[in-house]
Image (tube, rainbow, N blue to C red):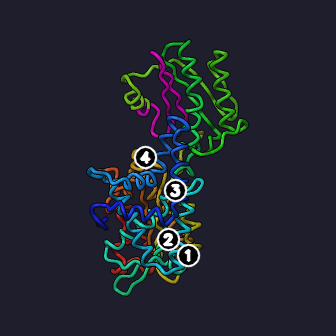
């Protein structure tokens, strides 16, 4: 993706925050900082979830050092937002400010807006003229691409990988933080190495910011774990959960959380949710799995089917630009290498719901933040062309629609 301005000018970051309103921006930063103090694991996850907001604020401090790749990309996209605001009609600028304000409330983040901005910059670098039709004209799609008198609509959307998980990572982090004090107390009285294996046939739902409800499934599960520890039970099970407490016997496990987690990941696989609590010389590991495999790619296919008829007009070739949120390097690599995203996307493209769609693209935070390496999709995204669309072979659209795999 081309550089918009180098180095990132802190004054432009100030202008970005001003688009939302100074009070709204300051309130949001305070909320994020407060939420990040809620627990070790959930706090770390909360900071990662709001990395864009926190990075923008950090860049406003006039850093006297070399920027990381992620900082630079976030700064450049914030600069794009400021530049776009200056070109939009009054109604378009009002829509942008409203979009930004909504992104700074509740469970929302700046990721959807930055996905839109990045998509525009990426397509512009490929030789397209890009208009923010959703903002300027109130169109159902976001961007209008033009190249050699050929047009295409782009609808940008963000889907969380949590929608395809039986056990949500946000809920798992909150459970681990709640249980951690109990485990530390228990380890003080029972030194050793332990493993609590959980199977959750009904899953475990919820996000990082969900309010604590003592009657919630998470609270009930926490209570059952506490009862097991208090009564020295080794097993507890019903239709909602299977709990089994055993000595931790893991060949090749290195000392320290990092080495232990690596060994546990190798033992339990990429879909397992893991947590390590250490106290004194004792170690207590929790490992949980849902009752079924994750279906993240399936969730993406279902979302595509709902987007195509509502976000694209059908009067021009349409591109659905998907952002897969809440994945890490390992999971993103697996979705690509196991051809899960490709399989589900091509299944969608083969159906009647895809008549308006000439291509689907997929990206993650790795691509948005300018990361490098084999885990990152080449050309900044995965692309899947719909060979049945009349414009599939249009030379003018080729840079945006030709399949990347």
Task: Place residue 204 in its image quadrant.
Answer: top right
The quarter of the rendered structure image containing the C terminus is: bottom left
Q: Which mark is residue 369?
A: none
Query: Which of labels 3 and 2 is toward the front?
Result: 3
Please name whichever residue, 191 or 106, is drawn nearer the observer in this view of the structure: 106
Secondary structure of the residue carrying tag 4 is: loop
Q: Few, some or many C-alpha atoms within 10 Å of disc 3 (few <14, some 14-19, many ≥20)?
A: some
Q: Is disc 1 in contact with disc 2, using a CB cutoff of under 8 Å?
A: yes
Q: Position of residue 322 (x, y in %)?
A: 47, 63
Q: Earlier in the sequence, mark 3 or mark 2?
A: 3
Secondary structure predominantly adopted by residues drawn in magenta: strand
Whole-angstrom CA distance, mark 4 to mark 3, is 17 Å
CA–CA distance in space, label 1 to label 2: 8 Å
Mark number, residue 328: 4
Q: Which residue is mark 2?
A: 155
Q: Which residue is mark 3?
A: 109
């Amino acid at each position: 993706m081309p550089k918009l301005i180098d180095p990132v000018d802190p004054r432009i970051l100030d202008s970005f925050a001003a688009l939302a309103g100074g009070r709204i921006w300051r309130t949001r930063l305070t909320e994020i900082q407060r939420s990040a103090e809620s627990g070790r694991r959930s706090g770390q996850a909360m900071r990662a979830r709001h990395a864009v907001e926190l990075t923008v604020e950090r860049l406003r401090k006039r850093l006297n050092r070399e920027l990381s790749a992620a900082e630079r990309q976030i700064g450049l996209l914030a600069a794009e937002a400021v530049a776009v605001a200056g070109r939009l009609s009054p109604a378009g600028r009002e829509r942008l400010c409203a979009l930004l304000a909504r992104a700074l409330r509740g469970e929302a983040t700046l990721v959807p807006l930055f996905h839109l901005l990045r998509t525009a910059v990426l397509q512009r670098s490929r030789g397209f003229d890009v208009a923010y039709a959703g903002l300027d004209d109130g169109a159902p799609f976001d961007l209008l691409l033009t190249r050699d008198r050929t047009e295409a609509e782009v609808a940008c959307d963000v889907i969380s990988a949590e929608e395809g998980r039986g056990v949500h990572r946000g809920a798992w982090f909150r459970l681990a933080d709640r249980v951690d004090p109990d485990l530390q107390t228990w380890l003080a009285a029972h030194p050793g190495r332990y493993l609590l294996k959980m199977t959750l046939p009904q899953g475990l739902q919820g996000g990082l910011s969900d309010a604590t409800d003592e009657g919630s499934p998470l609270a009930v599960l926490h209570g059952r774990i506490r009862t097991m520890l208090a009564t020295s039970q080794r097993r507890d099970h019903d239709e909602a959960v299977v709990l089994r407490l055993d000595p931790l016997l893991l060949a090749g496990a290195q000392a320290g959380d990092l080495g232990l987690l690596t060994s546990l990941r190798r033992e339990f696989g990429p879909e397992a949710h893991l947590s390590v609590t250490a106290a004194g010389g004792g170690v207590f590991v929790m490992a949980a799995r849902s009752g079924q495999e994750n279906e993240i790619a399936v969730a993406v296919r279902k979302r595509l089917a709902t987007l195509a008829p509502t976000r694209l007009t059908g009067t021009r070739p349409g591109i659905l630009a998907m952002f897969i949120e809440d994945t890490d390097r390992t999971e993103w690599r697996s979705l690509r290498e196991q051809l899960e995203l490709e399989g589900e996307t091509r299944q969608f493209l083969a159906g009647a719901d895809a008549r308006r769609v000439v291509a689907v693209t997929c990206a993650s935070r790795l691509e948005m933040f300018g990361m490098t390496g084999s885990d990152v999709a080449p050309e900044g995204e995965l692309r899947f062309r719909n060979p049945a669309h009349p414009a599939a072979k249009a030379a003018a659209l080729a840079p945006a629609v030709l399949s990347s795999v």
